[in-house]
Amino acid sequence: ETGVTQSPTHLIKTRGQQVTLRCSSQSGHNTVSWYQQALGQGPQFIFQYYREEENGRGNFPPRFSGLQFPNYSSELNVNALELDDSALYLCASSLKGSGANVLTFGAGSRLTVL
Amino acid sequence: AQSVTQLDSHVSVSEGTPVLLRCNYSSSYSPSLFWYVQHPNKGLQLLLKYTSAATLVKGINGFEAEFKKSETSFHLTKPSAHMSDAAEYFCVVSDLGFGNEKLTFGTGTRLTIIP
């Protein structure tokens, strides 16, 4: 059973640029969630994707967008990067309907915006 | 709205002594509660979960937590700390009423183990 893999692990961007982060979900999972973890903080929910559609969104502006593909992998896109977007971005997969709300997290993509 | 409050940002204990990490929650529905651990440069790992079954929940690596509805608490304990327990710990609440399995994390407690 493979876990959740994310790429890239680290990247540096400048203000105003755009970034795409990628996530492969755990085998057998059909739902992907994205979280932002700023330095010294707990992760915050960005959004969740199920059946290739957004299924819930946290308090993040529209320049944060995502995709889920038929193989349940996912992308997080952030446009017009701001300094405050510097954070660890975590992807988590789960099986909707399992009732347990148990998410499997990847190790994250650390984004630095200069 | 759901939320969790972790009462200590840092906890230091000596190796072999008990660990107590405190968490209070707020939830409009019957909550699911979790503890996750985060080691440096590693993903979040689930320690244990409470989903309205037994109020005393046993997890991995000797950790356990007790759900106390009257106190809205879900404190994490371990009888004897090991050096490998040094990490960041997050108390987490989830309301299935949201329908999207959204997790709300606390701000974390950094556990330091003194040799």
Image: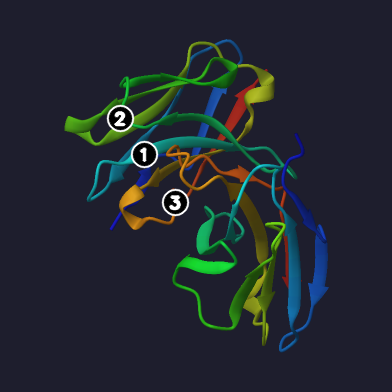
Image quarter of residue B47: top right
**Compared with residue A62, is residue B95 higher up or lower down, i.e. above or below?**
above
Mark 3 is on which residue type?
Glu
Give the side of residue B50 with respect to residue A94, left or right.
left
Label 3: state its secondary structure.
loop
At 60% across and 30% down in the image, what residue appears? B112
> In the rendered structure, which disc, 3 or 2, sits on the residue that comes first in sequence?
2
Query: How much space separates mark 3 and mark 1, taking CA atoms?
Result: 10 Å
Labelled pair 1, 2 in contact (Cβ < 8 Å): yes
Give the side of residue A108 with respect to residue B106, left or right.
right
Chain for disc number 2: B
Direction left: furthest residue: B70
**Compared with residue A16, is residue A102 higher up or lower down, i.e. above or below?**
above
In percent of width and height, residue B77 lies at 44, 21
Seen from the viewer's position, the closer of residues A71 and B50 is A71
Labelled pair 3, 2 in contact (Cβ < 8 Å): no
Label 1: state its secondary structure.
strand
**Residue indicated by mark 1:** B32
Q: Are marks 1 and 2 on the same chain?
A: yes
**Residue indicated by mark 2:** B52
Label 2: state its secondary structure.
loop
Q: Which colour scheme is used?
A: rainbow
**Residue indicated by mark 3:** B101
Mark 1 is on which residue type?
Ser
